[in-house]
Image: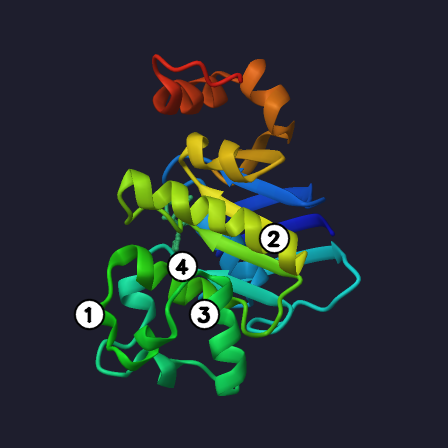
Amino acid sequence: MKINKLKIDLNDKTLVDIGFEIKSSLALVGQSGSGKSLSIKALLNMLPNTMTKELSIDADFELVAGKTLGFVPQNPFTALSPLTKIKKQFFTSQERVDELFEHVGLDASLQERFPPELSGGQLQRVVIAMALEGDPKLLMLDEPTTALDPNTRILILDLLKELQKEYEFKILFVTHDMNSAKSLCEDICVIKDGSMVEYGKMQDILQSPKEKYTQTLIEANFANRDFRK
Ligand SMILES: Nc1ncnc2c1ncn2[C@@H]1O[C@H](COP(=O)(O)OP(=O)(O)OP(=O)(O)O)[C@@H](O)[C@H]1O
């Protein structure tokens, strides 16, 4: 799918003005406040009503949150209602919930628990299962591993790769973490103050970033590591 133009304005100020193609998996990377979350909100049609958006897309499906669009937020703790059993937070058949649980590597017995009774990694798997409920064509993830410890982060990224093979959705992965971006995505779009500064194959941009801004993002994540492999 191709996002020819995504422009978000607040009063006279343009907050985001970008365009890119999501072939298989694209990381939208930038520092805090660069416009990553707003871009996802715009695609989900969830921008604050004070903002206006201009969106031109080439895709073989309509953008419908919860159906063609799946969303995994940053913090699984706030994405779930703490006083409701996990199984009651799904809006599909029990059979489908069992199937999704199996696919995200969770024991079905966890459905009987309340969210505070699960670990951060288990909760993030629940939220991923929820995002897959509608069989999305595009799965959007907003810093989904930030709240997790490094080992759990790797397991969740591996899970997402496996799920992508199985369900064949495209991925739009928002992060400021170049390490996670490299692990999950083939392509990258680097944004700064709402504008695209670099876009292309992940490997090419990691090896020879053109912009100082991208170099700084890479150095912050890969200090003392051989990331080009
Ligand atoms: N509800 C809002 N009202 C006004 N301005 C907003 C609102 N939400 C975001 N902004 C502004 O839009 C810009 C982009 O914000 P956005 O949340 O998309 O950044 P981000 O790249 O996701 O940052 P972070 O990595 O910290 O989440 C920022 O300048 C922010 O202050």
Amino acid marked by disc 3: Phe
- The local secondary structure at tag 4 comes to loop
Residue labelled with disc 4: 73
Disc 1 crowd, CA 10 A, few/some/many (<14, 14-19, 20+): some
At label 2, the amino acid type is Gln
Q: CA distance from mark 4 to mark 2?
A: 17 Å
Q: Nearer the viewer, residue 164 or 1?
A: 164
Query: Which residue position holds label 2?
Result: 164
Percent x, y for residue 98?
47, 77
Residue underneath mark 3: 101
- Asked if residue 194 is positioned above or below residue 142 in the image, the reply reads above
At a point 64% along the width and 68% down the height, the residue shown is 68
Query: Is there CB contact under 8 Å for labels 3 and 1?
Result: no
C-alpha gap between disc 3 and disc 4: 18 Å
Is residue 60 found left or right of 101 in the rendered image?
A: right
Dot 3 or dot 1: first in sequence order is: 3
Amino acid carrying label 1: it is Pro
Residue at the disc numbered 1: 116
**What kind of element bears circle 2?**
helix
Could you give the CA–CA distance between mark 1 and mark 2, rounded to whole angstroms? 28 Å
**Residue 38 relative to residue 60: left or right:** left
- Secondary structure of the residue carrying numbered label 1: helix
Instruction: Write the residue at 35% across / 16% down.
Output: 223
